[in-house]
Image (cartoon, rainbow, N blue to C red):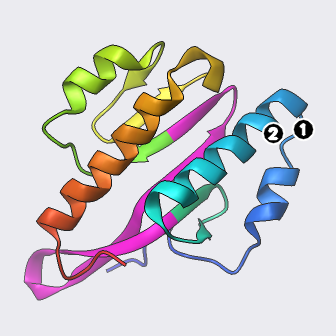
C-alpha cells in the first residue's frame, strides 16, 4: 500500500503564510490561521506542502488498518481558500445558507476572500465539524 501524500511535516507554518505574495490574501490567511487555532485549541502543523492542519484523528481502513488526517485545516489555493470541514454536523446546511459567497464540496469549503463570508458563521462551521468528528472518532481526535 502506498504511503499517503498528505501527512504532517516539520515545515514551518509561518514560512507558508509568509510565502503568500498578495498582502490582502496573506492578511486573510493570518486571520484564518488565528481563528482555526482558537476554535480547534491546537497548534497548526503543515500537512504536506500546502495544508495548514489543526489536530489529527485516526480513521479505520479496510483490513484493520488506520489512516490519519488533520481534524480540520485550510489551504491557500490559487485565488481561493479551501477550508476542510472533515465531518458534516447537523447544522451545516443552515449555517452554509448564512455564510455568504462560497462553494461546498463533500468536505471542502471554498471561499475567495474572507470579506465574502460571515466569519462568525465560518467559525461555527469549523467548531461543529470538530464536534461531529469527535463524536464519530471519540478516541482519535487530538
Apparent side of residue 101 relative to residue 89 in the rendered image (left or right): right
What is the CA distance from the residue labelled 1 to the residue labelled 2?
Answer: 7 Å
User: Between residues 117 and 110, which one lies in front from this camera angle?
Assistant: 117
Q: Is most of the magenta stretch helix, strand or loop?
A: strand
Q: Are marks 1 and 2 in contact (CB under 8 Å)?
A: yes
The residue that appears at 64% across and 37% down in the rendered structure is 77
| Up-down relation of residue 39 to residue 61 (above or below) | above
Q: Which mark is residue 26?
A: 2
For residue 21, the mark is 1
- Where's the N terminus, which quadrant? bottom left
Q: Quadrant of the C terminus?
A: bottom left
Of labels 1 and 2, earlier in sequence is 1
Crowdedness of circle 1 by 10 Å Cα count: few (<14), some, many (20+)?
few
The residue at 60%/46% (across/down) is 75
SS assignment at label 1: loop
Whole-percent x and y of residue 20?
83, 43
Specify the segment rendered in magenta. 54-82
Magenta segment includes 130: no
Q: Residue furthest bottom?
A: 64
Amino acid at each position: 500500500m502506498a504511503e499517503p501524500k498528505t501527512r504532517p511535516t516539520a515545515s514551518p507554518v509561518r514560512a507558508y503564510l509568509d510565502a503568500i505574495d498578495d498582502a490582502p490574501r496573506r492578511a486573510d490567511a493570518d486571520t484564518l490561521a488565528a481563528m482555526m487555532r482558537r476554535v480547534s485549541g491546537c497548534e497548526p502543523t503543515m500537512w504536506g506542502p500546502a495544508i495548514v492542519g489543526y489536530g489529527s484523528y485516526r480513521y479505520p481502513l479496510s483490513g484493520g488498518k488506520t489512516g490519519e488526517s488533520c481534524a480540520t485545516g485550510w489551504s491557500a489555493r490559487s485565488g481561493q481558500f479551501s477550508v476542510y470541514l472533515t465531518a458534516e454536523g447537523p447544522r451545516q446546511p443552515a449555517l452554509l445558507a448564512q455564510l455568504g459567497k462560497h462553494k461546498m464540496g463533500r468536505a471542502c469549503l471554498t471561499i475567495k476572500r474572507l470579506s465574502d463570508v460571515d466569519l462568525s458563521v465560518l467559525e461555527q462551521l469549523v467548531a461543529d465539524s470538530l464536534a461531529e468528528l469527535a463524536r464519530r472518532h471519540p478516541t482519535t481526535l487530538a
